Image (tube, rainbow, N blue to C red):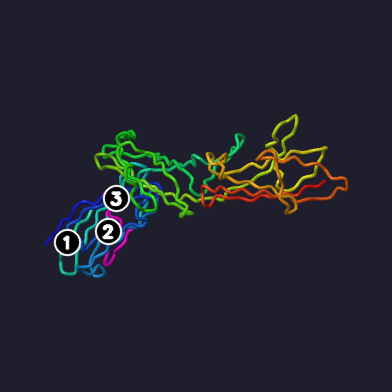
Amino acid sequence: MKKTLTIITILATLFIGTLAYAQSDNSMFVRSSPEAPGAFEETTLSLVSYSFNLDTSEISWTLDGKLALSGAGKKSFTFTTKGVGSASTVNIKIITSGGEEIDRRVTIRPANVDLLWQATDSYVPPFYKGKVMPASETKFKVVAFSDIRTSSGTRPPNSSLNFTWKRNYEPVSGTNGLGRNSLSFKNSYMDEEEPVSVMVSTLDGGGAGQRQITLKMFNPEIIFYERHPLDGLRWHTALNNGFSLSSDETTIVAEPYFFTENDLENEKFKISWQMNNQSLQVDKKWELTVRPGASGGQATLKVVMNNLVKLFQSAEGATRIGF
């Protein structure tokens, strides 16, 4: 007796993806490792059965029309996938010890999906050229970029692709649909890390890809700079490792990094200055002018910032001053 099962299609990505198939016998299925293989990636397909003994069955694996592996109990097969959009077809024939024949077909068509993210409301100074890091309760924008092919081999525009987003492994309502290649949200103060994933699929079902990233929250920082009377703010030299006064007076600016920008001028954003553990009164919120003492010596300058609007946005910075 010969039983032919429905075609299985594995829709894979360069990074991470999904395994999707239909079958008529739920007691027998194919597992893929990785679960969704990427382009040019070593992949192992394994058979699992709860209705008959695979170890005593004759199993053959054919890759793109060429016999690649056969023998009793050959329950797994390893091969390397092709490039993006290029299908690899694996035909599996199983003859059980009772003489039953089962045919299975697996098609792997890799796609490429990547995710880029931006912390949209974290503050950094205008000169800053690095990545803007997110703090707790930051607003994010995540954008999906895909290289995906339909069954005919064409590359559809974003407007013809369906996007399905998840945060913390849960679907995000109101964010899915055709052309919706970006996700905007605010991180919860309860989450130090936040997994974000997207599934991208073509309308004809010929291609799909998935990508997941984990967004990690950072603690805000305080960096000290000198405000020079002629040069202005000397952004190129941070003073956090200590410095010596070289003039009759020096103005020190405490620059906040990665706090929520809109909260910086809020009355609930608190900043305090201390010199040798003694509180200081300052004329300007973000800066302090210091003058050398008659006897010289050293002092420790400390600044504490607390954003009372956000539960876990606070920072402390200190530096040593030589007089």
Which of the labelled discs sits on residue 101, or is there none?
Answer: 1
Which of the labelled discs sits on residue 64, or is there none?
Answer: none
Dot 3: element: strand
Magenta highlight range: 62-77
Q: What amino acid is at disc 3? A: Ile
Classify residue 145 as left or right of residue 137.
Answer: left
In this view, the residue farthest toward the right is 295
Residue 71 falls inside the magenta stretch:
yes
Is residue 60 depicted above or below 206 in this figure? below
**Which is more toward the observer, 304 or 90?**
304
Which of the labelled discs sits on residue 30, or is there none?
Answer: 2
**Which is more toward the observer, 273 or 18?**
273
Q: What amino acid is at disc 2? A: Val
Alpha carbon separation for disc pair 1 and 3: 23 Å
Which of the labelled discs sits on residue 10, or is there none?
Answer: 3
Dot 1: element: strand
Q: What amino acid is at disc 1? A: Glu
Query: Pointer 3 and pointer 2: residues touching (CB < 8 Å)?
Result: no
The answer to which of marks 3 and 2 sits earlier in the sequence is 3
